[in-house]
Image (tube, grey):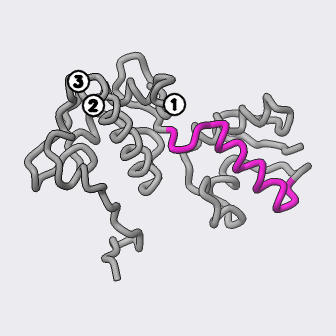
Amino acid sequence: MAATLQDGVQPFKFPKIHREFPPFFSLQITTSTRQNQLESWSRLIQRYCRHHKIFQLSVVDYQNTELFKNAKLNKTLYSDDIKKVIDFMVSPDGQQRAEWVTPAKASAWIWWRRPEEWASSIASWVEETGQKGSVLTLYEIVEGDATENQEFHGMDMEVLRKGLTVLAKQGKAQIFGADDQQGVKFF
């Protein structure tokens, strides 16, 4: 049986390339090799963030964590290269799996699910649970008992707002209220 952390969550299993391949931590010069490397980093970052339910990744806060550092290999992906990886994730080539929060590139939203995908997930839950016509607070959606088994349970409120905005543009929801007291009605 695999070891568990104190909160009962299984530890993240890094891919072999992260565990055993030192060049992975140095962005490569050859275009095709670098493209493959950026794609691998993108998939890894998305999987890691999904596993840990990280929605916003700060370059400074995460540069010395297990995600970008391998102590066994004594290798680190440094902040300038982390930004290049996230720049790739932001681009169409990187399937827009990230979005810089500020122009300074200090932190980024990591879209292991894009807002459109979150919107679809929430809309499916609304349909399956008969919530059409219901009014819910944003807090109920991310922290309520009714959503405990949903992937969006515990999500960042700003990510929820982005997903609900997609539903509002599709005519499937209406968001109302002040920032700290927002609610949503589903159609």
Relative depth, front residue between 120 and 23: 23
Identify the residue at image location x=72%, y=65%: 146
Q: What is the magenta range? A: 111-131
The numbered dot on residue 69 is none
Q: How many marks?
A: 3
Relative image position of residue 137 (x, y in whole percent): 73, 48
**For residue 153, above or below residue 178:** below
Which quadrant, please, contains the N terminus? bottom left
Mark closest to the chain's N terminus, 3 or 1 = 3
Q: Is residue 104 left or right of residue 164?
A: left
Identify the residue at image location x=37%, y=29%: 86
> What residue is disc 1 on?
95
> What residue is disc 3 on?
30
Mark 3 → mark 1, Cα distance in angstroms: 21 Å
Q: Is residue 174 left or right of residue 112?
A: right
Mark 1 → mark 2, Cα distance in angstroms: 18 Å
Crowd band around label 2 with a 10 angstrom C-alpha radius: few (<14), some (14–19), many (20+): few
- Do the residues under discs 3 and 2 have CB atoms within 8 angstroms? yes
The numbered dot on residue 33 is 2
Q: Is residue 121 magenta?
A: yes
Residue type pointed to by label 1: Gln
Predominant secondary structure in magenta?
helix
Snapshot quadrant of residue 59 = top left
Relative image position of residue 6 (x, y in whole percent): 34, 73
Q: Is residue 5 magenta?
A: no
Mark 3 → mark 2, Cα distance in angstroms: 5 Å
Residue type pointed to by label 3: Thr
Disc 3, SS: loop
